[in-house]
Amino acid sequence: MKITAVKVFQIDTPLAGSGYRWAKGRSITVADTTVVQIVTDEGISGWGETTPLGANYLPSYGPGVRAGTVALAPRLLGLDPTLLGALNVVMDRELQGHSYVKSAIDVAAWDILGKSLGVPVHQLLGGRQHESLPMYGSVSQGRPEEMAERAAEFRSKGYEHIQIKVGDDPAEDIARLEAVSERSPGSETILADANRGWRRDEALRFALGTTGIDYILEQPCDRYADNLSIRRRAPQPFKLDETLQGLDDLNQCLADDAMDVACIKISKFGGLTKSRLARDVCAAAGIPMAVEDVWGCQIVTAAIGHLAISTPPDSFLNTTDLQSYNDIELAEPSVHAVDGRLVVDDTPGLGVEPDLGVLGEPQATIK
């Protein structure tokens, strides 16, 4: 099997409601989605997607995904997309860094591999290890009472994991956490995610001011040294997300005992191939994981669902249905939410075929 063409699509992805807000006033109402189709000489096509959370969350942005894909695609023509290791070697050789560009290509290749073998991608990633997956509901930053109401909505839908966005003034953030936790059942997992928003003194004030609440403290600071300092002084379980930009970062964090929980976002690692490796390293080290991505529609949600469903239960914390936060339907979902849990079916490949009417014409075709 050979790659004969790579097609690059762009769609605007409006977020449901009033959008999504996180630390330091950052917010987004419309995401910029890039969809990649890999076409082969055997008539099998695969689909991948990358959707950055705007341009001010991580060093990735929508136009950059497409520019990088157009630059990389000519080097992929003629390659066998089912040889995932060799494909990644070529991508890394021809384009330094830019994992968010490679992610959509890698995911599309996994889709092709699953379709060619007639099996779901999760069977190739280790096999199904869950019937369904616990999801977290992400509560966008707002006033304490608003966030408490939003958390209650998630609970009414069956969610047992609630993530709240903090990372501003520590006193206000403490009020946010208190408001959400007051109505929390004892079995619930709460995460307070600062998205790198605090200085180390602010993070420590928050951590020490909330010792009476059971929750996981997530990515309080930007710099690794600051996070490590807080990790060693805060009493809460500690989760890292944005720090983990690749396997080198993961290895450093494991060596430094820098976290109790890891967040594996597939576009930060360059797709499913390296995310699977990161997952397996964390599992071997006894580090539970949230398996997800930065943002996305049905293709990304399917990809993270297949990786998550094949993750050992002892090493798994939660995942999320990114599509549920959007106000657009790109495809019929093969991975979807039911009563606060993510369900992954056994359709070959990712199980997602985008609606071409929604996608429109490709912005670029490389063949």
Image (cartoon, rainbow, N blue to C red):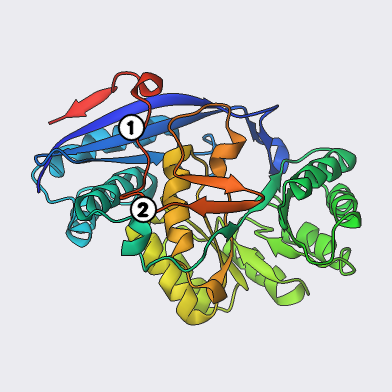
Q: Against 141, is 31 above or below?
A: above
Residue 196 visible in this rendered orientation of the protein: no
The count of marks equals 2
Q: Against 214, is 330 above or below?
A: above
Q: Nearer the viewer, residue 197 or 173?
A: 173
- Amino acid carrying mark 2 in the image: Gly
Q: Categorize mark 1 by other alpha carbons within 10 Å: few (<14), some (14-19), many (20+).
A: many
SS at mark 2?
A: loop
Q: Against 253, is 2 above or below?
A: above
The reply to whether discs 1 and 2 touch (Cβ–Cβ < 8 Å) is no
Q: Quadrant of the C terminus?
A: top left
- Where is residue 351 drawn, in percent x and y? 36, 45
Residue at (79%, 41%) from the top-left corner? 150
Q: Categorize mark 2 by other alpha carbons within 10 Å: few (<14), some (14-19), many (20+).
A: many
Left or right of 135, for residue 297: left
- Amino acid carrying mark 1 in the image: Arg
- Where is residue 53 drawn, in percent x and y? 54, 38
Q: Nearer the viewer, residue 17 or 248?
A: 17
Q: Earlier in the sequence, mark 1 or mark 2?
A: 1
Badge 2 is on which residue?
270
Residue at (60%, 73%) from the top-left corner? 258
SS at mark 1?
A: helix
- Where is residue 233 drawn, in percent x and y? 75, 75
Left or right of 340, for residue 9: left
Q: Nearer the viewer, residue 339 or 136?
A: 339
Residue 211 visible in this rendered orientation of the protein: yes
What's the mark number on residue 229? none
Badge 1 is on which residue?
66
Left or right of 297, for residue 213: right
- Where is residue 19 drawn, in percent x and y? 66, 30
Q: Mark 1 and mark 2: span between their CA atoms? A: 15 Å
